[in-house]
Image (tube, grey):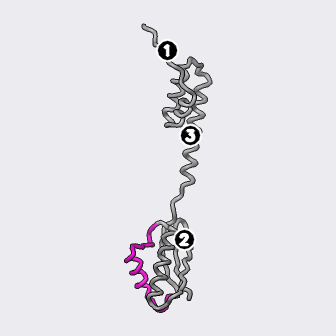
Amino acid sequence: MPACPPVPPVPTLTAASSFFSTTGSVAIRLLNLALEASMKIKWILPAAAGIVALAGAQTGEQRSTTAKAPVVRAVEFKNFRDVPVKEIVNRLNDRDIQLVERPYSAAYVETAQGIVEELMAEKGHPGTHVKPTVTSIPPHAVRVTFTAAP
């Protein structure tokens, strides 16, 4: 059987960067590196297992920190005496603002607040401040209440 040509040594940075590609290929790459460099496998396999476990733990931590935004289940309008709620809802719909059954977004609620204040000014109530209040509805929802204050 002909002898295999010598394999050039793998630079440390290349070997280190390949550790974090995919968990399955990490152990295989480490094993290949050990064989290519004529290392003893006694210490490289536990090291590969440790790196695979560490990579799995890191991805688990990433999953646990990404939480979904709560869903808006209800929207209420209080103290809008001269402007019917139906007219407010129609104006929001005309501007493509639909809050109910959507993920909660503070920016989206702020946009809706501005639109309602604009409508109040058009209806003869300039300077009316609309205050949004967000109330939690367990387990994973919220209620948004818009309150008009002169």
Task: Report crowding for label 2: few under 14, some 14 to 19, many 20 or more residues within 10 A (C-alpha).
Answer: some
Query: What amino acid does circle 1 point to?
Result: Pro
Residue 4 makes an appearance in the image? yes
Question: Disc 1 versus disc 3: distance between alpha carbons?
Answer: 32 Å
| Quarter the N terminus occupies | top left
Residue 137 shows which numbered tag?
2
Residue 35 can be seen in this image: no
Marks 3 and 2 close (CB-CB < 8 Å): no
| Mark 2 vs mark 1, CA separation in Å | 67 Å
Describe the element under mark 1 as helix, strand or loop: loop
x, y percent for residue 116: 47, 81
Give the left or right position of residue 12, taking residue 123 as reference.
right
Report the residue marked by disc 3: 55
The image shows residue 26, relative to residue 67, as above or below, that is above
Q: Which residues are magenta?
A: 80-102
Nearest to the observer: residue 26 or residue 139 = 26
Q: What amino acid is at disc 3?
A: Ala
Instruction: Give yes or no for contact between labels 1 and 3 (Cβ–Cβ under 8 Å).
Output: no
Provide the residue designation for mark 1. Answer: 6
